[in-house]
Amino acid sequence: MSEKNREGKRAARERLAIEREKQKARERRRRALIVASAVVGVLGLAAIAGVIAANSGGKKESSGPVVVPKGASGQDSLSIPEGKDSAKSTLAIWEDFRCPACAQFEEMYRKTIHELADKGQLKVEYHLATIIDKNMGGKGSLRAANAAACAQDAGMFTPYHDVLYKNQPEETDDAFGKNSKLIELAGQVDGLDTDGFKKCVDDGKHNSWVEKSNAAFEKGGFKGTPTVRLNGKDIFGDQNNPLTPEKLKKMVEDADK
C-alpha cells in the first residue's frame, strides 16, 4: 500500500472518530436540556411541553400499526438482511441516514462489506435509527428510513441504501425530510421509481416500524451511530486498534475457515 493511501485511510478514520465525538457531545447537550426543562417544568408545564416537542423533532408521524418490511429479520423483525443466512459471520450495523459518521463509514467499508456478502462469507443486518432527528430537529432520519424500508419491499434495499448515503445532505439540512427528494433519489436505482414505491413513501407506511427500531436502539444502550458488531463483538470505534477494511476482511475470512 502506498504512503498516500495509508495517509488517506488514516485521515478517514480520524474524521470518523471526530464525528462520533461530536454526536456524543450533542447527545449530552440534549439530555442536559431535557433535565433542565424538567426543573423549569415545576414552574410551567406548558414550557416543558414546548421543549420536549422541540427536542423530539415535533409531532410523531406514526401511522397506525407496525408494518414490517418484506424480508425483515432478527428480534421483532427489526433488521434488514443482506447476504446468505448460511454465512458464518454476521455484521450488525446501527445507522442513521442523516449521520455524517455513518456516511463516512459507508464510504470506507461499503465495497468490502458487499464483496464479503456476495461471496456468502458475511451476513449483514442493518438496523435503522433516527437520533439525528431528535438531536437536530426535522424528519429526515425517519422519512429516509421509511423510504429504505419501502425499497426493501421492492427487493432493492441495498442499492437504495447506498444511494442515500452517497447523496447525504449536511447534517443540519433536513433535505431527507422531503418525500419528493427521497423519491427523486429512487430514480438512481433501476426499477425502484414506481407508483407503489411512491405511495409507500408518501403514506409513511413503515414509520411505526422505524420508530420501533429506534426505540430498540435507544434501549440497547449504544453510544452512537454507527455501531458495528461482528458476531456480537463491537469492532468499531477503538482508536487504539482502529478497524480497517483489510482487518474486517481478515476477521471474516478467518471465521470462514
Image (cartoon, rainbow, N blue to C red):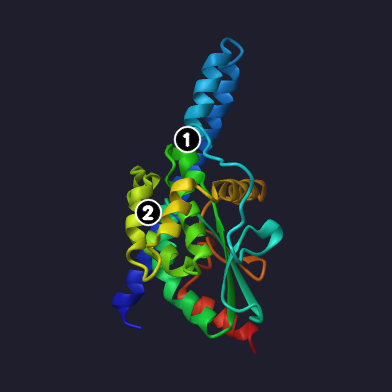
What is the residue that sits farthest to the bottom in this orientation?
257
The one of 133 and 235 positioned closer to us in this rendering: 133
* SS state under label 1: loop
The quarter in which the C terminus is drawn is bottom right
Residue displayed at 33% across by 63% down: 187
What is the residue that sits farthest to the right in this orientation?
75
Q: Is residue 171 left or right of residue 95?
A: left
User: At which x and y percent is residue 225?
Assistant: 51, 54
Q: Residues within 10 Å of mark 1 (few under 14, many from 20)?
A: some
Q: Is residue 26 above or below residue 124?
A: above
The one of 123 and 183 positioned closer to us in this rendering: 183
Residue type at mark 1: give it. Gly
Q: Please give the label number shown on residue 182.
A: 2
Q: Is residue 151 left or right of residue 208?
A: left
What is the residue that sits farthest to the left in this orientation?
4
The quarter in which the N terminus is drawn is bottom left
Q: In which image quadrant can residue 93 be found?
A: bottom right
Q: Is residue 40 above or below residue 17?
A: above
User: At which x and y percent is residue 73?
Assistant: 65, 64
Residue that numbered label 1 is attached to: 57
Front: mark 1 or 2: 2
Query: What whole-number distance in Å separates the C-alpha atoms at marks 1 and 2?
Result: 19 Å
Q: In which image quadrant can residue 139 be found?
A: top left
Q: Can the viewer see residue 94 in this picture?
A: yes
Residue displayed at 46% across by 75% down: 245
User: At which x and y percent is residue 150?
Assistant: 49, 58
What is the residue that sits farthest to the front in this orientation?
195
Q: Is residue 146 left or right of residue 4?
A: right
